[in-house]
Amino acid sequence: MISKERLKNIFINMVKVDSPSKNEYEMVKWLVSYLDERGIKAKIDKVGEKFGGNSGNVIAYIKGGLDLEPVCFQAHMDQVSPCLGVKPIECGNIIKSDGSTTLGGDDKAGIAAVLEAIEHIKETNTPHRDIYLMFSVCEEVGMFGCKYLDIDDLPVKNIVIIDSVGEPGAIAYKAPSKEHIDITFYGKKAHAGIEPEKGINAIVVASHAISNMNIGRIDSETTSNIGEIKGGGSTNIVTDSVSFNIEIRSHSMEKLKKEIENMKICCEEAAKKFNTTYEFKHENSYPSFELSKDSYIYKLTEKSMQLAGITPNPMIIGGGSDANILAGKGYDCAIISMGVYNPHALNEYLNLDELYITTKAVINMMTLEI
C-alpha cells in the first residue's frame, strides 16, 4: 500500500541532506544507500568531472515482469540556494522550510514520489514494466548532469520527469529553446569634466543598442530579457567598457535565430554611430522540445493520471529543464507536476496530499499498458 507517512518521511529525510548545485555528493550517497538497502544497484556516472561537480548522476535499472515498453523516471537532486541546513516544518498537510532556506521540494518531491512508488510495488509484489531511474545533478545551473549524460547508460526511449510545480495534472509537453548572449561595448577613457569630447562613453553606446532591441514579450512564442550589466566607475571618467548579458527564449528556432541577428544588427549600428567596437558572443543553453500527444509516454501519462483521479492538463511552458536536454538526445519526455509551490523562493512549500496523488499516478505509469 502507498504510505503517506513513509512518503513524508522520505521527503523530509532528503531535504535535510545538503545538495547545492555541483555539490550533490551527500545526496548521491543517500540515494545509492537507500536503493541498495532495497536490492537495487545504482550506478554513479562521471559527469561531474566534465563541469567541476563533486559527483555524477544516479542511474538504476529494475527488471520488470511485464512485457511492456520500458519507462525511465527522472528527477534532479540539486536545489537552488540558499539551501544549506534546511529545517523542514510540518503545518498539517503542508511542509515548508523555516524561511531561511529554500525547501528543496524542487525537485526532491519528485524523487520522493518515485521512491515511494517503488516501495509500493515491491511491498505488494505488483507486476511492473522494466523501470529505469535517473536522478540528475546540476539541473538548476545549466542542466549539466543531462548535458553530459552518456546515452548508453540510459537505454530507454520513454522518460517521465517529475519536476513541474503546482497541483497534480500538469503534463508539460512543449518548452522553448534558450539562447544566452554576452555583449561588451568598448569606449574610450577621458576626463569627464575637462575633455569629455575626447572620450567615448560605452554606457551611451550600449544604451543606444539596447533601445533598438526587442526586449520582453516579443510574440506568443518568444521572449527576451536583459540580465546583468557591468561597467562604469567614477563619474569623472568617461566609461570605456560596458558588458551585459541577454537571454532569448522561443519555441521557434527560426524566430530565435532572427532575434539573435537583430541584436547583432543593433550592436553593429550602435558601434558604427559612435565609432567604436564591440564583442558579441552567444551559445545555445538548451534546445526546444515538443512531445507528441500521440506518443506512447504521453498517452501512458494521461491514462495513469486519469486512473489516479487526476484530470490531465497539457501545458506549454516557458522555462527549460532536463527535458529539453534529454529530448535533444532523442528521448520522449513528459514533465509532470507534484504539488510543489513557490519554487526557488524562501516560502517554497509542498502539499503532501498532492504529492500522494502524484505518487498514485507514478505507480500507474510503472504498471499499466495502454
Image: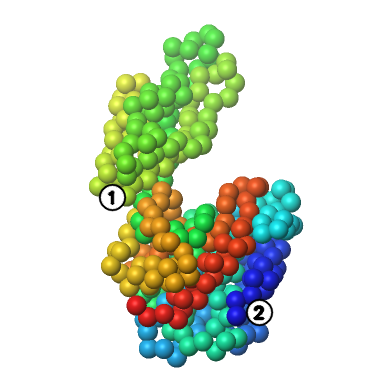
Amino acid type, callout 1: Met
Residue appearing at x 50%, y 60% in the figure: 168
Q: Residue furthest front?
A: 309
- Which of the pair 300/252 is nearer the observer? 300
| Numbered tag placed on residue 213 in the rendering | none
Q: Residue furthest top?
A: 194
How far apart marks 1 and 2 lie (CA) works out to: 42 Å
210 and 34: which one is in front?
Answer: 34
Tell me residue 255's x, y (percent).
27, 44
The answer to which of 83 and 351 lies nearer the viewer is: 351
Could you tell whether 296 is left or right of 233 in the image?
left
User: Residue 330: percent from the left, percent from the top?
Assistant: 33, 69
182, above or below 322, in the image: above
Q: Quadrant of the N terminus?
A: bottom right
Tell whether label 2 touches label 1 (CB within 8 Å). Answer: no
Q: Quadrant of the C terminus?
A: bottom left
Q: Is residue 284 left or right of residue 231?
A: left
Does residue 248 appear anywhere in the picture? yes
Residue at the disc numbered 2: 33
Judge whether residue 107 can be spotted in this image.
no
